[in-house]
Image (cartoon, rainbow, N blue to C red):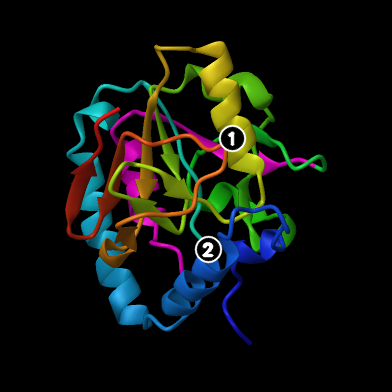
Amino acid sequence: MRDPQPDDRARARPDDGGKQPLRDRLTAARRARGLPERAAAARELARHALELPELADAATVAAYVSVGGEPGTGELLEALRERGTRVLLPVLRSDNDLDWARYTGPDALAPGPRGLREATGPRLGTGAVLAAGAVLLPGLAVDAAGWRLGRGGGSYDRVLARLARERPGAGPALVVLLYADEVVAAVPREPHDHPVHAAVTPEGVRRFVR
């Protein structure tokens, strides 16, 4: 049985700007990574992320629980919680938008739709993310200009559009978590895409001029 993959949340759209072949290649590369490599990567990713001033200064951080071949976030979530950060996790709604719930520890996670793991606490509403000082984003790649390749489901497109609309010019730090070889020269772009401020990989931090 293969790993659950967040990329299974959506199928390619005919108007996705040619992103799906790149998604397929990157997803296959993630599946090929062994468990020891994934565990080591998760430790290093957490170490580099915790050094970010954007996370140190944020009272609230919106994050996510990694699944399948994604860079592991478990150690990072626990470290943020232990240092007193309010951590919000996404809860997938039936309309594909994201609600949010507070992370209170690994024992307070439960299986969600499409292979996800979600916090079991009270739902705080789609607007809860507006309180975040930093948003940790899943993705498959980011390019040299900070354009993120998402997984194709559209949920984070809604989140990023909400942040741009409700907090124009004063939004949170947007940080995508990736493996080092997923920082690429260019990714296909669509009009609704939003660039990120930084990428964290097991090898360090890459910042982008906005």
Find residue 132 and report its horizontal and vertical position in percent. 45, 23
Q: Which residues are magenta?
A: 67-93
Which secondary structure, mark 2? Answer: loop
Find residue 48 and report its horizontal and vertical position in percent. 19, 48
Q: CA distance from mark 2 to mark 1?
A: 25 Å
Picture quarter with the C terminus: top left
Q: Is residue 50 above or below residue 71?
A: above
Query: Image quadrant of residue 207?
Result: top left
Decide which of 37, 188 is in the foreground and name it: 188
Quickly name the residue at label 1: 192
Q: Amino acid at mark 2?
A: Val
Residue 191 sits inside the magenta stretch: no
Q: Residue at x 40, y 43 (%)?
A: 147
Q: Residue at x 56, y 12 (%)?
A: 166
Q: Is residue 89 visible?
A: yes
Residue 72 sits inside the magenta stretch: yes
As drawn, is 91 to the left or to the right of 149?
right
Decide which of 9, 45 is in the foreground and name it: 9
Of the two numbered discs 2 and 1 on the same chain, state the one appearing first in sequence. 2
Query: Image quadrant of residue 122?
Result: top right
Q: Residue at x 31, y 42 (%)?
A: 145
Which secondary structure, mark 1? Answer: loop
Q: Residue at x 21, y 59 (%)?
A: 44
In the rendered picture of this protein, how many numbered marks are placed on residues? 2
